[in-house]
Amino acid sequence: MASDLPFTSENRSTTFGLEGQPYDESRAPRADFHSVLPEYFAVMGIPLVEGGIFEESWELVADPPVVVNERMARIVAPAGSALGRGVVLDWGGQLRTLRVVGVVGDVLDDGFDAVAEPIFYLPYGAAPNRGMSVVARIRGDAAGVMEGMRQAIARADPDVPAAEMRTLDALLAETVARPRAASWIGASLALLALLVASAGIYGVLSYAVQSRTREIGIRAALGADARKLVSMVLGHTAWLLGVGLALGLLGALGAGRALSGILFGVRPWDPPSLVLAAVLLADVRLVAAWLPARRAVRVDPKEALRSD
């Protein structure tokens, strides 16, 4: 059981200080705190990094042990272990010192687009909450097990409804629904823009090479090697492509910063994506220049000289 679940924004928080240092509420760091049963960490897959987990307690405890996450542990003990350190809390108008007995992994409590905040966990008896959530790890068909849980709750007390029973995957899906939709729309428009750009590059370069058919014919009539003529055309188009890619890279960097709010685990400047787009455009440039250049060098120089 837990008082506050991740990705729900239902977090209680308080300021805290360190034992042996003056407590100044105006400058004190802030941390979220959750009332949990000791099995909560194993069920949720939150790893134990150091120390241990407190025992189950349903009675009011005066000075309970606390478990902190790694982010808070670095604040409590910037150099060394946080185990045994005292955390000073303004608890009900009185300063209380609670001892750290364990350190667990960080949790993105407020969503994928947030950073891990300082969090400490208390036994239920230390900070009882009227609204507690039951968390269960299910193997197999989640829907069938959830229905069995509803029936068991109804048999125990028909007046207690099993409200808001859902899987963690469903909770996560609700959290990222809007950013995911925006990402799909953005990806579709980006792909369309890439295809339009590819078609535009192909058309412009193909026309530019075809317009040099007369020049290529004159060079061929004067004895220029066909491979050198093709290399000359490809080199010119490569220069044009380089300028275009440089300008496009600057635009991509600016667009990436603007879209950073809907990116999870991806930097606004993502080298694989930029390289993939550049390689695709380079391939289009190669085909657009190589095909008409090959046709031009195969044209009879007499025909090329007579063309307008």
Image (cartoon, rainbow, N blue to C red):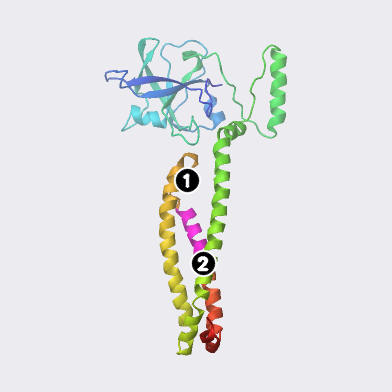
Tag 1: amino acid: Val
- 224 w.r.t. 56: above or below: below
Residue named by callout 1:
266
Badge 2 element: helix
Tag 2: amino acid: Val
In the image, residue 283 lies in the stretch drawn in magenta: yes
Residues drawn in magenta: 271-285
Give residue 51's position: percent from left, percent from top. Answer: 42, 28
Give residue 218's position: percent from left, percent from top. Answer: 47, 86
Mark nearest the camera among 1 and 2 is 2
Q: Is residue 123 left or right of residue 86?
A: right
- 173 w.r.t. 155: above or below: below
- Which residue occupies the foreground of this view, 296 or 101? 296
Neighbor class of circle 1 (other Cα within 10 Å; few <14, some 14-19, many 20+) is few
| Residue that appears at 54% across and 33% down | 45
Residue named by callout 2:
204
Give residue 90's position: percent from left, percent from top. Answer: 37, 14
Badge 1 element: loop
Magenta span: helix, strand or loop, mainly?
helix
